[in-house]
Amino acid sequence: MGVGTPAAGNDRLILLTGASGYVGGRLLRELEKGSYRIRCLARKPEYLEHRTSAATEVVQGDVFDTASLAKAMEGVDTTYYMVHSLAGSGSFQENDRIAADNFARTAKEAGVKKIIYLGGLGREPGLSDHLASRQEVGKILRESGVPTVELRASIVIGSGSLSFEMVRALVQKLPVMTTPRWVRMPAQPIAIEDVLRYLVAALHHDVSESVIYEIGGADGISYEGIMREYAKARGLKRLIIPLPILSPGLSSLWLALVTPLYFRVGRRLIEGVKNPTIVQDDTAREVFGIKPMGIAEAVRRALENEDRELAETRWNDALPSRSLEYHWGGVPFGTRLVDSRQIEIPCPPEQVFLPIQCIGYGKRGWYRYDWLWSLRGFIDKLIGGVGSGRQPRYPYCLLPGDVVGFWRVEAMEPNRLLRLHAEMKLPGRAWLQFEVEGGPQRSVLRTTAIFDPVGVWGLLYWYLLYPLHVPIFKGMLRGIARSACQVEGVFLSSIGKSGMEM
């Protein structure tokens, strides 16, 4: 059965916890695709409601509040337990223990028929605190008397997975890495798509008593191997020098220097990689009939899915109008760097979109600082690129696949969206996107520059050119606004600095 495939019995009510997390959020989308009856438990429902479909119920509750748990479990057939306290305050082991005990007892009292839990791979003795806690949670759920399907996984490969993001941050930033012994500890990473397949399949797996299944990808590999696969997929050359020393404790301090964003939780994961996380019982593949992908495909799929999610992002929603006001250098979005600006224009969207359709063509050009665009094209031509001389097939009517200088039209939605993908020589990938929203009297135009740097050279390129973004894109916005208003003989006199949000 594929992920999200409807099946008999999908009218049962499912309670999903952890829907605001990485795996839980993706599981929610897959369950919604399968038209399952879903109820999500959330401490702050307002943070989750905009991510759910109209058919999904969101209720307020907390695993530390048994009264709210009892109410949330009324009429529930199956529950997904996707709660972990690794990033919380205090002892995460004690928090996990209390939360699991509350959940297990309440599920038993409410008559829940099955609990599905995603835990961590690893065998005794000598488990890290992190892995020992994950497995203790599974034991508490199994001993509740409610049949529990515990899926134990190794490293999850996917854009947004903490383990994957730590690997990516290290490989992106460090051309030369001195790696400790734990980086070569055997593991069996699994793609997020395969994890979701197992979680959905477990929903239809009839059990009369609790069971543990070990799940992993097709390849046994280490963190170092994952680093090499990621570097290969991104076209990066990395020198990895093994060291016989450097303990997980010292490594966590090293992580704080290189990837401070992931230090707080990542240090717990590093303490856990001293344990091999290899599937030793392959029963899950036989029971569920799932053939997991290998590491190369998993990394490739993670990057492809990230590209798709990026393309589907509506920056008018994702980045509030003033979100970049104090972010020199743009805002990180995964590995991407995003520089977005907007302006209000007293014209309807169809009128604003007309000059966007003419971008880069004829006398209008790029509406400001054309000489800078021409200079960039000249440099690109000198180093073997396409240059800036290419013109679209049908001026004033851009279509996907058309070329505009050193850009190619990747997506076009009339009167709403134009996205260009750069074909110039770059240490990375770049996009330029125009979004228009509004009503009969006023519109909001947002331009967004997106850059996916490759290695240190890519980051250097972005930050060296970033000071030019302010005059270029601010001038472009004003030029487009002026042209849009002139279509009906209206001029920009009504648009002052108060109408700008740069």
Image: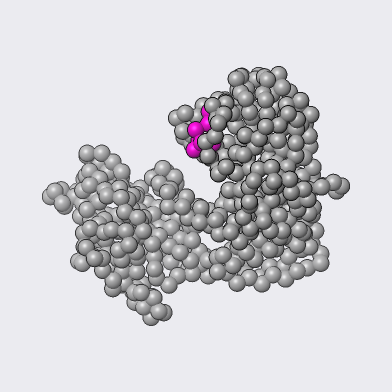
Looking at the image, is 432 positioned above or below residue 490?
A: below
- Residue positioned most to the left: 489
Q: Is residue 335 magenta?
A: no
Q: Left of 247 or right of it: where is 314?
A: left
Looking at the image, is 202 positioned above or below residue 192?
A: above
In the foreground, 443 or 313? 313
Looking at the image, is 140 positioned above or below residue 164?
A: above
The location of residue 222, given as percent across then percent down, is 72, 60
- Residue positioned most to the bottom: 382
The location of residue 78, given as percent across then percent down, is 63, 28
The location of residue 394, given as percent across then percent down, is 21, 63
- The quadrant the N terminus occupies is top right
- The residue positioned 46% from the left and 52% from the top of the image is 308
In the foreground, 498 or 372? 372
| Residue 163 appears in view | no
In the foreground, 109 or 384? 109
- The residue positioned 40% from the left and 53% from the top of the image is 340
Looking at the image, is 419 positioned above or below residue 268?
A: below
Question: Residue 65 lies in what quarter of the image?
Answer: top right
Magenta stretch: give its range.
Answer: 30-38
Question: Residue 450 lies in what quarter of the image?
Answer: bottom left
Question: Residue 231 lies in what quarter of the image?
Answer: bottom right
Q: How is the image coloured?
A: one colour
- The residue positioned 21% from the left and 62% from the top of the image is 395
- The residue positioned 51% from the left and 27% from the top of the image is 57
The location of residue 245, given as percent across then percent down, is 81, 64
